[in-house]
Amino acid sequence: MRIYAVCVYVFLYTPIAIIALFSFSAGRSASQLEGLSVQWYGRALNNPFVMDALGNSLFVAFVSATLASVLGTLAAVGLQGIRGPARALFDALIYIAVMIPGIVIGIATLIALVTVFGVVNPWLEAFWPGSAPAPTLRMGMGSLIAAHTMFTLALVIIIVRARLAGLEGALTEASADLYATPLGTFRQITLPLIAPAILAGFLLSFTFSFDDFIIAFFVAGSETTLPIYIFSSIRRGITPEVNAIGTMVMGASLIMLVVAQLILRRGQKR
Amino acid sequence: MTQRARNWLLVAPAGAWLLVMLVLPLSVVFVFSFGERAPSGGYVPAFSLEQYANLPARFTAFKNTLMLAPLGTVAALLIAYPLAYQLAVRTSDKWKTLLLVLVIVPFWTSILIRSYAWIFILGGRGIPALLDIVGIEGVRLINTPFAVLVGIIYGYLPLMVFPIYVSLDRLDKRLLEASSDLGAPPLTTFLKVTLPMSISGIATGCMLVFILLMGEFLIPALLGGGKVFFVGNALVDLFLQSRNWAYGSAVAVMLIVIMLVTVTLYMRLISRLNVQHDDAPLM
């Protein structure tokens, strides 16, 4: 049994180890180790396309995770007091949001937004005030942030709601009995108690958005995110540079995960 | 402001977001699936069932998905269960958490990067080269259904281990002792006690993996080399290459319908199993 477990761990970590190992190759081959060097890390970090894609990925992940955390938390708190068919409908929407495959979300968002933009853009042009040229709506960072926020919003609601359900009503009741305003109760009682869940939701959202390829592939327009860059590099032929980027991305995800775990655990102890 | 109004105000932004970015796009896909392709690509309004009638043209994609998704789910289950059992039942509390985290960590790193690593391992210079040394020649692994299956198992194993671990961890270990004290051989204990008690974990794990596999694109794209393709790959082709939005929409609607039907049937089956389990005199 123990040997079996070891085998599974080897299975899980060999591919990761191979990428990390090959990223230190001194040669040009991506699948052979010809001496050790960190030159590919330098190449990757000095490649303007990589840096541009990384910047886009970080920006989209940060903005969508922030939006999702704020809107998701508000919704989770509001949903506590809503019952009946409206609640059932909202729950169904959250369920659909996490169940529908990312690829369907991607294509659906693409054709819906392109169609809407096709209708709105001529209107904007016709009725834009002043002499400045009217802005044109197109697929890009905005649509990508909107799509990522949709999915991660559902994630945050699920996570925060689970935490809210575990809270004792006695604290908020006591606060209300002591004449705290609803906002005061929320700020001083509820918010500190659900803060770890919100932070965990933020970090999970960030990781999801940062790692997402399939939605971005459809929705990002001409913009490139890091997963899109990596995917098209693989298509052109894997280089040690891609291995170096992959190793750095996995390292960064690992750090995020450890941070999320630490925060969640501290929240549980409190 | 009343409590009621305040609740609605809190929910409104998220609700509006879901409406515009989820309900609207899915509705558009549904409507477009009854339309026609414009000559230059895109969509022309129409009301025809032509796109649905043409679905058999993509039969291979549906066939591959409907064969490899269940197969991958079962394979992941068979590999994950012994590990989850080992972690939950046979491992000391000291090591449990760390070992579990080690299983989950890969899942939270980019599946794109983890999958392409298998191009090295299964490619010409990987395992086939090793087999060559042993004397087994001419083995081709990359760009085969086998490669896709390995990628699937590798990618989704953590998602299967976790829920099974949780259900086994909750299991009262004294039940296992009681069973063996009463003379049950280990296999009987496993079949009559352990397995029924972990059905909920198995059910959750299988459903999570199956749902994600139905929409898979990356693993077949990277490891199937265009020879083993899923519905997801067909969708990418239809929307980004041939720009046939109407037909692509019909394929997407079909995929969702198949998912809904299988998941509903599956849930029925599971709830029946659970009912039987609750009737068992053990509890």
Image (spheres, coloured by chain):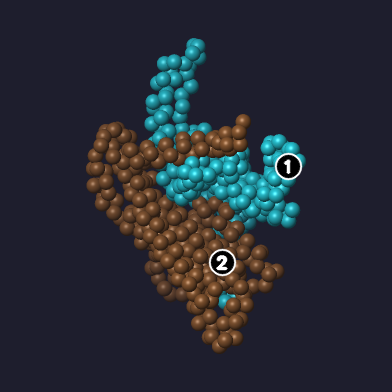
The residues bearing labels 2 and 1 have C-alpha atoms spaced at a distance of 40 Å
> Is residue B1 depicted above or below B184 in this figure?
above
Label the cyan chain with its letter.
A
Question: Is residue B205 among the parts visible in the rendering?
Answer: yes
Q: Which amino acid does label 2 sit on?
A: Ser
Who's brown, chain-wise? B
List the residue tagged with mark 1: A177
Q: Spot the residue most to the front.
A: A177
> Given the image, what chain letter belongs to the residue carrying mark 2?
B
Q: In which quarter of the image is residue B165?
A: bottom right
Position of residue B190 measured from the top left corner of the image (x, y, whole percent): 52, 78
In front here: A226 or B127? Answer: A226
Residue A258, image x, y percentages? 67, 54
Check disc 1 and give the amino acid type.
Asp
Query: What crowding class fits label 1: few (fewer than 14 Cα within 10 Å), some (14-19), or many (20 or more)?
Result: few
Q: Quadrant of the N terminus of chain B?
A: top right
Q: Residue at x 34, y 41 (%)?
A: B30
Which residue in the structure is indicated by mark 2?
A: B167
Front residue of B137 and A234: A234
What residue do we see at 63% from left, 49% from top? A164
